[in-house]
Amino acid sequence: MTAYPMLVAVHVLVGAVALVTFWTAGLLRKGTPAHRATGRVYLVAMTGIVLTGAPMAVVRWLDGHVVTAAFLGYLVAITTTGVWVSWRAARDKAAPQRFAGPVYVVLAVVSLMSGAGVLALGIKVGAPLLMGFSSVGLVVGTDMLRRRRRYVRGDVTPRWWMVEHYTAMIGNGIATHIAFLGIGLPRLLPGVDGTVLHYLAWFGPLFVAIVAKLVLDRRWKPRPVRVPAPARGA
């Protein structure tokens, strides 16, 4: 077995670990030792995905598969951002200014620029998949830079870190499931591949993630406080 197939095999292996531990951590009670331990294994597996995915993108680029290489690089960028944010949010929950430091800014800019690059590439080659999925990097990068202003001022709620953590973990889940449904499953079961399934595999996890984000925000995200209007004549 040559180096590249071995790299792919390791990538698939750590991806399988990530898929299992994502759901295990998600179903366990939040904050328990089991949840934290499983979450750490998941983040280590996701780190393995990043470390194996980056050279895979380089190899595809050298082979002349520019579109595939660009998209793999994009997935590496947004996955790196999700892994770092989900980890540091829990570590820096008492220090939002430290959380929003230089690494946070670099990752936000990389997410934003890579999303813009994939959008431009999708328009150039006429690929709706690239155009649609570019929204992840664009939204993530823009939202991170917007929130950073609050973190630097210390204008945060007590559970700000939890919102950051589960939002990043949802993003990680998108990458995990897209890799499995859109890339791994068709190779394991070629008979299930097809145009409709192809787009469902890519945009299905994105839709589920949006719903999960709305549900979790409803439970954990602080609601704005209404200030009663002054009485007339006061």
Image (cartoon, rainbow, N blue to C red):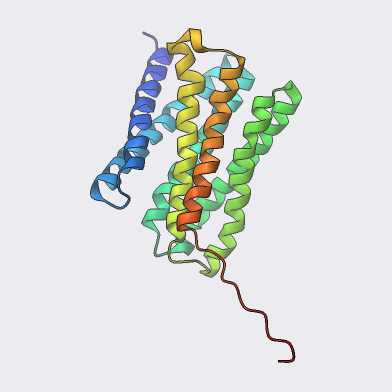
Q: Is residue 27 left or right of residue 217?
A: left
Reply above or below: 39 against 187: below
Reply above or below: 61 against 108: above
Residue shown at 32% from the left, 37% from the top: 24
Nearer the observer, 233 or 102: 233
Residue 62 seen in this snapshot: yes
Reply above or below: 31 against 47: below
Quadrant for the C terminus, please.
Answer: bottom right
Q: Is residue 124 left or right of residue 66?
A: right
Quadrant for the N terminus, please.
Answer: top left
Residue 46 pos. (x, y %)? 40, 35
Q: Is residue 42 left or right of residue 32?
A: right
Residue 61 pos. (x, y %)? 58, 20
Residue 77 seen in this snapshot: no
Residue 203 pos. (x, y %)? 58, 30
Nearer the observer, 50 or 41: 41
